[in-house]
């Protein structure tokens, strides 16, 4: 399989840093998170990922899972912006961060 590189428009408050082995490392504002990505079947480019938190999927058929945080996060989240739209970024119980890039 030949890897394909896709480059989207620049967004200061979001970035896909690396992916592989069923996970992705993303940047949301100043915070980095590791989340599941079943389509990332390749090996990651970086050996070690430093992140504020990781969502660990549940083992049952209903999914579920939980966040594990290695670094403290602002309790009320933090502000993100896309073009003229400002919003609060904060992990949800469902592996998302309260919006969909």
Image (tube, grey):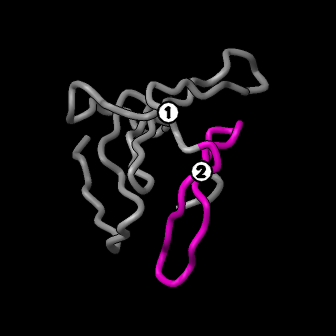
- Give 82 or 1, whichever is nearer the viewer: 82
Q: In this view, does 52 lie above or below 17?
A: above
Report the residue marked by disc 2: 77
Q: Residue at x 30, y 42 (%)?
A: 18
Residue 99 position in % (x across, y down): 62, 59
Q: What element carries label 2?
A: loop
> Residue 79 magenta-drawn?
yes
- Give 63 or 34, whichever is nearer the viewer: 34
Residue 71 position in % (x across, y down): 44, 30
- 92 horizontally vs 24: left or right: right
Residue 74 position in % (x across, y down): 55, 44
Q: Which residue is drawn at 35% across and 67% down?
A: 12
Report the residue marked by disc 1: 72
Please tell me in which quadrant of the rendered image residue 61 appears.
top right
Q: Residue at x 38, y 51 (%)?
A: 30
Q: Is residue 92 above or below residue 100?
A: above
Q: Which residue is drawn at 48% across and 74% down?
A: 82
- Give 34 or 13, whichever is nearer the viewer: 13
Which residues fall within the magenta stretch? 75-96
Residue 42 position in % (x across, y down): 31, 33
Name the N-terminal-most of marks 2 and 1. 1
């Amino acid at each position: 399989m030949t890897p394909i590189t896709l480059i989207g428009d620049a967004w200061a408050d979001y970035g896909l840093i690396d992916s592989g082995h069923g996970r992705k490392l993303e940047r949301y504002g100043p915070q980095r998170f590791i989340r599941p990505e079943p389509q990332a079947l390749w090996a990651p480019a970086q050996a070690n990922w430093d992140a504020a938190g990781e969502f660990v999927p549940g083992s049952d058929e209903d999914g579920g899972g939980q966040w594990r945080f290695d670094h403290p996060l602002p309790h009320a989240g933090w502000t993100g912006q896309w073009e003229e739209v400002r919003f609060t970024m904060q992990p949800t119980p469902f592996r998302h961060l309260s919006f969909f890039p």
